[in-house]
Image (tube, grey):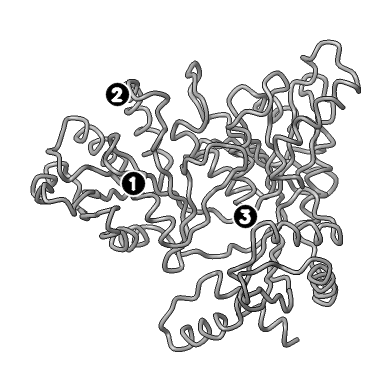
Amino acid sequence: MASILPTVAIIGQANVGKSSLFNRMVRSQQAIVAREAGTTRDSVLGRVEYRNHQFWLVDTAGLKSAEDEFEATIQEQIIEATEAADVILVVVDSTQYVSDSDRQIAKKALRSKKPVILLTNKADLKESLADDEFKRLGIKKIIRTSAEHKSGITDALNEIVEHIPARTEKPADDVLRIALIGRPNVGKSHLFNTLAGKQQAIVANIAGTTRDINRIRVRYQQHNIEILDTAGMRKPGKQEVGIEKFSVLRTLQAIEQSDICFLLMDVNELNTQLDQRLAGIIDEAGKGMVIVVSKWDSVEGKDAYTRDALAPKIVRSFKFTPWAPLIFTSSVTGQNVTKLFELAIGIEGRREQETKTRVLNDLLQRAVQAHPPAGLKNTHPKLRYMVQTDTTPPWFVIHGSNLKYVHWSYKRYLERALRETYDYTGTPIKFSFIDEKQVKANKQRIAEGKAPVTKQSKREIEAKKTEKK
């Protein structure tokens, strides 16, 4: 079963340092930040790993469409946040006296009955007020922080992990979970209903959950499939641009719960930044993906030429996920709807395939001989061997020395070589580069009980076991 990460939301007024705190928490812990090629790089979502815990950290920076609309949208944002997040961080400026807006934010957060932590930021400044000023907000746990000087960050992370479960691998089941992802009004709900009508038998109609993700289980060609619809991600009539409301949390949670995502785009409004951003999040989460162009029936005078003309433009916009297949569909006529099931089943099979270490190392040696990795002066990376340590998504570990000098373009080169050897259409593949000295040091620290056993360290140890075999 696909694992689900807890979500921690940062809320507060503008200019209190939310983004700075977000960046400190994410970067200081070497978390994987969602990076989407061709889009604005304003960090909104970060994946944090700390003390054997993993969680999504969500920042509200830039979540308002314009600064003068903040007061009109803040209450809706807070409601969405308190409904969808597992832990709420309320940030205030410690140099400013408590305002009515601060009180409203704190009140809404506390009403959620979720764990709430108050971060009084900019505590390094001499104008900073004492904690007594902020106790009136009613939040019991108060942590003084300074994003500028990195103080209080560890205390905040320690408090967060006290309220979320440790990262665990859930036992696998035989259900393939498919999430329908996309902007509002691109046809997700219509496709959801159409897919439900294409199955051989409806297994179960699961009622709406607290996460507002509609789902239904169907059976198709001896496969149990659960379809997740994020139709509730936005209230009707609200106009939004980009990932600008806390409703993105529900989409994020659907991605986490799924194995494969169908990223829907309206044929009449293609290649928006939000579509690219969502594709980047799906890629980073390691989920399979199909780019689905919906409402094909609405195109007048469509023919093969029109489709052949559109496809290259779409592919160029998603060149950072070239492995994702593209399909044109219509829920009205049923065009290619059944094929979506077939695509998903095929992708899941490729995500689960295991490779032979001998083949991987032959591939690595050929790639290195054909194009050695560049380094700095007399220091060059040496790639010694490669093993696969995980599936769904396929994960490969390359051992060697001076691997910190491996350029991102070289990693892309290795990925292309691997995809030419094995068919990984529809799924991202992940790489880790591990220096052999680091492996020995990590094993020693774990043996002495000086370091937590993280997913990364497990991967290193498992790679070593595979090598010995």
Tag 3: amino acid:
Ala
First reached walking from the N terminus: tag 1 or tag 3: 3
On the image, numbered disc 1 is attached to which residue? 88
Q: Residue furthest right?
A: 304
Whether residues under marks 1 and 2 lie with C-beta atoms below 8 angstroms apart, the answer is no
Q: Is residue 313 visible?
A: yes
Compare marks 3 and 2 and give the one earlier in the sequence. 3
Residues at marks 1 and 2, CA–CA distance in whole angstroms: 20 Å
232 vs 298: above or below: below
Q: Element under label 3?
A: loop
Question: Is residue 392 in view?
Answer: no
Q: Residue furthest front?
A: 377
The residue that mark 3 highlights is 2
Q: At label 2, which amino acid type do we have? A: Glu
User: Which residue sits at x=16%, y=33%?
Assistant: 99
**Residue 34 vs residue 62: left or right?**
right
Residue 140 in picture, x, y percent from top left: 19, 51
Q: Residues within 10 Å of mark 3 (few under 14, many from 20)?
A: many
Q: Secondary structure at mark 2?
A: helix
Task: Give the mark toward the camera: 3 or 2.
Answer: 2
Q: Position of residue 341 (x, y in %)?
A: 80, 40
Badge 1 or badge 2: first in the primary sequence: 2
Q: Which residue is mark 2?
A: 71
